[in-house]
Amino acid sequence: MANIKLENVVKRYGDVVAVKDFNLEIEDKEFVVFLGPSGCGKTTTLRLIAGLENPEEGNIFIDGERVNDLSPADRDIAFVFQFYALYPHLNVYDNIAFPLKAVKVSKPEIDTHVKRVAEILQISDMLNRKPSVLSGGEMQRVALGRAMVRQPKVYLLDEPMANLDAKIRVDTRAEIKRLQHEIGATTIFVTHDQVEAMSLADRIAVIHLGVLQQIGTPDEIYNKPQSLFVAGFMGMPTMNLLDAELVAKEGTSVLRLRHTDIHLQLSPERQSGITSTTQENGLVFGIRPEHITAASQPTEQKISAQVHLIEPLGAVNILDLFLGTHAETQDPILLRVRAHPTFQVAVGDTIWLDFDAAEMHLFDRETEQTIW
């Protein structure tokens, strides 16, 4: 297999910069997921690596070789598209064997490779079937098999499960993870689904507006977001993000959530991270719903809120709590809390909250980067 390196890569379409000054290194045998909303540049970046697009600036290396001027066929990569593009007149065996036949591999060798891949993908009993009688999940496995049979340096998968229903997506996701570990392939997987990204990736590259926002393990991306975008994009529901300011109270500095009565004590280390410049730029406080504990009686922090809405999701309830009203827009300020279904409350009830101090985040509103 191979490592991949993107060095200051830029791709433009007229006045639109689809990929901006992109720098990334992917290790041999690593599974990296490109994650972001539609139009963020993740598929364009994948196509640049494949050679289906050419960068205006920067360099792309595969296994230490600069490939900017190499055709897709000479890069030794396998590309699995969102749409399976199977040949309808060929059976499963011939669809998988097609790349080997194209390069004149001998029939006995083709037979060995196809049957080995079919066994790994658990489609050995389908080799004589035509694509028209296969389910979506089965067709996806055939498309994966056609990519695997070549044993390329790099596998590139562009939202390969986007057209599958939820149950098949879960099964196929587990299958792809197992296969990647089994064959030890360097793999890049594009998706807008954060659950897919978290469950599949060794590392996740979060992309927004053509810019690489953050690269890290699923744990780092979820628990240590480096920007407002990453914090607000990851999680179901996403992180609570509320305007804040540093104010004096009882002879000390505390963090107040603007337009609310909530004041949070800060450690000296966290206070020192808030400079006069960041205060002028504006502060955004962040905390995930699962890092807030709700109680029916006053807590040590003595933070209270009124239940605005209850979303029962089976294993958990999501409580939308009313904290106050924006002075400028008169919009309600809401805080989302994840609670166990046994925590019984009704809309309009007052409950008390404890914030996990170790899981609180603060961002610079102007730069959108993390402060702590």
Image (cartoon, rainbow, N blue to C red):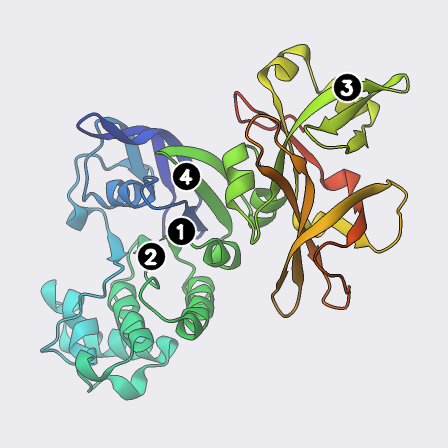
Q: Nearer the viewer, mark 3 or mark 2?
A: 3
Asked whether the viewer can see residue 224, the reply is no
In the rendered image, which residue does mark 3 sit on?
A: 247
Q: Nearer the viewer, mark 2 or mark 1?
A: 1
Query: What separation in Å lies between label 3 and label 2 (alpha carbons)?
Result: 47 Å
Task: Name the element at disc 1.
Answer: loop
Query: What separation in Å lies between label 3 and label 4 (alpha carbons)?
Result: 35 Å
Q: Are marks 4 and 2 in contact (CB under 8 Å)?
A: no
Q: Residue at x 90, y 43 (%)?
A: 300
Q: Are marks 2 and 1 in contact (CB under 8 Å)?
A: yes
> Type of residue at label 2?
Glu
User: Residue 357's spot in the image, x, y percent?
Assistant: 78, 38
Task: Name the element at disc 3.
Answer: strand
Q: Is residue 32 left or right of residue 368?
A: left
Q: Quick one: label 1 or label 4, which is nearer the N terminus?
A: 1
Q: Residue at x 34, y 69 (%)?
A: 164
Up/down of 243 relative to 151, above or below: above
In the rendered image, which residue does mark 4 sit on?
A: 207
In the rendered image, which residue does mark 1 sit on?
A: 192
Task: Name the element at disc 4.
Answer: strand
Q: Quick one: label 3 or label 4, which is nearer the N terminus?
A: 4
In the rendered image, which residue does mark 2 sit on?
A: 159
Query: What separation in Å lies between label 2 and label 1 (alpha carbons)?
Result: 8 Å
